[in-house]
Amino acid sequence: MDHERLLDEAWHRPGVTAIDLPPVDVNQVLAERYELDRELTFTRTMLWDMESRKAAAPDIYIPTVVRAGSAKKWPSLRHEGLEDFTRVSDQRLWADPDRFGTIIEHVRLDHGHQRAFFVGDTTFEGRTATTDQPVFHVEHSVTGAEDRPLNLWRIVLLTEQVDRRLLDVFTELGEDPYLRVFIEVYLQKDLGVSFRRK
């Protein structure tokens, strides 16, 4: 499977709902919006480490979205700096967050370029994805300098026509002045840094 090609082809398909969220300058947001219990420069290496861990354990790193204990990951296949696996989890529906649905994602971690691709699917190993929202593909990636990393995120939902409700959900998400929950989890769980939101 060519995860990047599938996402790019879907991105340019007429009618899909495609959102490219604003880049997040992690250290700038930390300086402006958080009080930490110790000095910290969040590095690009840390950010990619977080992305890799989150890809494998979404219920740990995205507890606001993925139902605790619901994530299952199939073994990784590694080849030429790439790591491929499939994960299945129960996730809150984007436009109806009080409800959960089964989400199937074929994951590729491109460790060399620090890009993570998630290609949605309808079935896998006897499991069936929810039909209560469109299948979606995602790219999370890391760019910027080692001491000034940027967190990038784009998503394309395979709709027949652009869905205004879904656009509104992601527009609001992109306007959140705080770090995304997975970075906060990494700060506490993996770096041992306590913080307070200002």
Image (cartoon, rainbow, N blue to C red):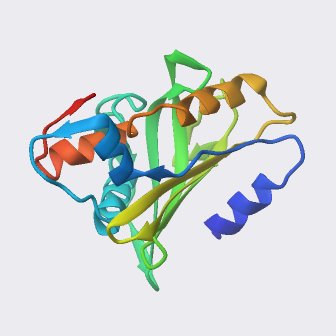
Q: Position of residue 27 (x, y in %)?
A: 33, 53
The single residue placed furthest to the front in the displayed view is 32
Q: Position of residue 43 (x, y in %)?
A: 29, 64
Residue nearest the viewer, comparing 147 with 56: 147
- Which residue corresponds to the image point at 53% horizontal and 52% vertical from the top-left? 23
- Which residue corresponds to the image point at 42% horizontal and 72% vertical from the top-left? 77
Residue nearest the viewer, comparing 131 with 113: 113
Q: Position of residue 108 (x, y in %)?
A: 50, 65
Q: How many marks?
A: 0
The single residue placed furthest to the right in the displayed view is 14
- Choose top left, top right, bottom left or bottom right for residue 134: top right
The single residue placed furthest to the top in the displayed view is 98
- Which residue corresponds to the image point at 37% horizontal and 64% vertical from the top-left? 148
Residue nearest the viewer, comparing 184 with 138: 184
- Which residue corresponds to the image point at 46% horizontal and 86% vertical from the top-left? 80
Taking the image as shown, residue 116 lies to the left or right of residue 185, namely: right
Taking the image as shown, residue 72 lies to the left or right of residue 138, namely: left
Instruction: Locate the C terminus and report the quarter of the image it occupies.
Output: top left
Vertical side of 111 occupied by 9: above or below: above
Would residue 160 be seen by someone viewing this image from the given angle?
A: yes
- Choose top left, top right, bottom left or bottom right for residue 35: top left
Q: Position of residue 65 (x, y in %)?
A: 43, 30
Would residue 73 be seen by someone viewing this image from the given angle?
A: no
Taking the image as shown, residue 37 lies to the left or right of residue 60, namely: left
